[in-house]
Amino acid sequence: MPSYTAFTRSTIRQALGHNEAMTSSDQLPFAREIQQRLCLMQGRQAPSIVWPEGCYGSAGSWIVFVGPSPGGGSRNATPRDRVTDAETPLWNTDFLEPVSRWSNGFRASMQPLLECATGLPLLDGAAKLYAFVNFHWQQNPDAQNVREEGMRAGADDVVNVLSSIHPRLIVPMEMRTHNLLHEALTQCGYRTREPLEQDVAIQISAKGRFHRRMCVYSVDGSGPLSGSLVVKAPQHPARMFNRDYAFRCGAAIRSCAEQLFNRVDCISIDERV
C-alpha cells in the first residue's frame, strides 16, 4: 500500500479516540469531531506524506469531495500514467483556491457547501477541513466526458487517499463517481447501509423544480473508512452558480449526514426557497 496511507493509523484515528474506525457507537456529535480535527492540526506537525496527482486539500479533512477528474484542460488530452507523488497535502492551512480561483460554479458554491456541512465559517475552520480526490488524474472540462477506464484505473488511489484522511463525510460530486466509489468500497470488503425510504424536496430555483432523491449510505465493516457517511451532492458544485441554491444543497448534505449517523430508516429533507 502506498506510503500516504500510513498516516491514518499513527495520528488521526488515535487523536480522534478511535482504536480502529469511526462508528455510530462513538456517539460523537459532529461539532466535537470537527474541533478535534482542528486541534489535532494545531498541535501536531504536518505528516510527511504525498498524494497522487488529482488530489488536493487538507490531510486532516472532515469532508472530502470525490470527482471523476480535475476540471479544465482539454477533452482530448493524450493519456499518460498518473504521477504518484504529485501533491503535498495541506495541514492547518486554509484551502482557498476552489473558492477564489477555480471555475465560476466552484467560486459560488464551495463556501456555502462547506459552511453548511461543517457548521463553521470558511475562515474560522471550514477551509482547513476539506479536500478533493479524483478518480482520473488528467484534466477534463466536462465530467461527463471523463473516460470510464481511466476512472477505474484510479479507484485504488481514491480509496487509499480517503483511508489516509479518514473523513467522516464523503461527497461524490456526480453519479458515475458515486457508483464507482460504492463499487470500490465493496471490493475492499466494506458493507454499506442505505435508508429504506426518502422524503426529499430540495428546491432548485424559484420556478418550482426540485431534487426529489438523495444518493446516500453509511459505510460499515472493518477498516479506516468504517463509519464514514457518503452523501452524493444534489448537483455538481461546478454547476451550482447560485449561492442560495448551494446553501440549500449544503444544508441537505449536512442533514443527510446527521440522519445517516443516527441510522434512520427514512431520510427526510425539506429545503425550499
Image (cartoon, rainbow, N blue to C red):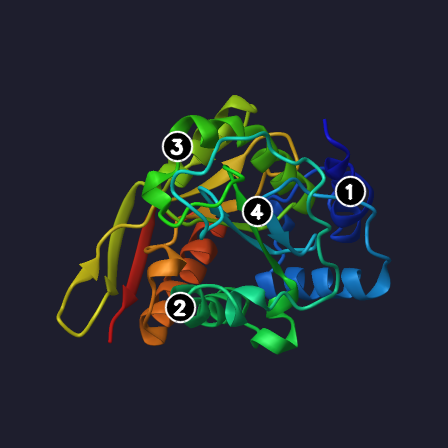
* Secondary structure at numbered mark 3: loop
The residue shown at (67%, 46%) is 165
Is 88 placed left or right of 25 in the picture?
right
Q: Earlier in the sequence, mark 3 or mark 2?
A: 2
Q: Nearer the viewer, residue 199 or 243?
A: 243
Q: CA distance from mark 3 to mark 2?
A: 24 Å
| Circle 4 Cα neighbour tier, 10 Å, few/some/many (<14 / 14–19 / ≥20) | some
Q: Residues within 10 Å of mark 3 (few under 14, many from 20)?
A: some
Q: Is the C-beta separation of discs 1 and 2 under 8 Å?
A: no
The residue that mark 1 highlights is 7
Residue in the image at 69% along x and 48% along y: 87
Q: Is residue 19 visible?
A: no
Label 1 crowd bin: few (<14), some (14–19), many (20+), radius 10 Å = some
Q: Which residue is mark 3?
A: 147
Q: Secondary structure at mark 4?
A: helix
Amino acid type, residue under disc 4 in the picture? Ser
Give how far apart the Cα atoms at labels 2 and 4 are.
Answer: 37 Å
Q: Where 222 sits versus 69, above or below?
A: above
Q: Which residue is mark 4?
A: 24
Quarter residue 6 falls in:
top right
Going from the N terminus, do you reach mark 1 or mark 2 first? 1
What numbered label is drawn on residue 104?
2
Question: Do the CB atoms of the residues marked 1 and 4 lie less than 8 Å apart?
Answer: no
Judge left or right: residue 242 versus residue 4: left
Q: Earlier in the sequence, mark 4 or mark 3?
A: 4
Closer to the chain start, of discs 3 and 1, is 1
Residue type at mark 3: give it.
Answer: Arg
Q: Nearer the viewer, mark 3 or mark 1?
A: 3
- What separation in Å lies between label 4 and label 3 (alpha carbons)? 36 Å
**Residue 175 sits above or below residue 82 on the image:** below
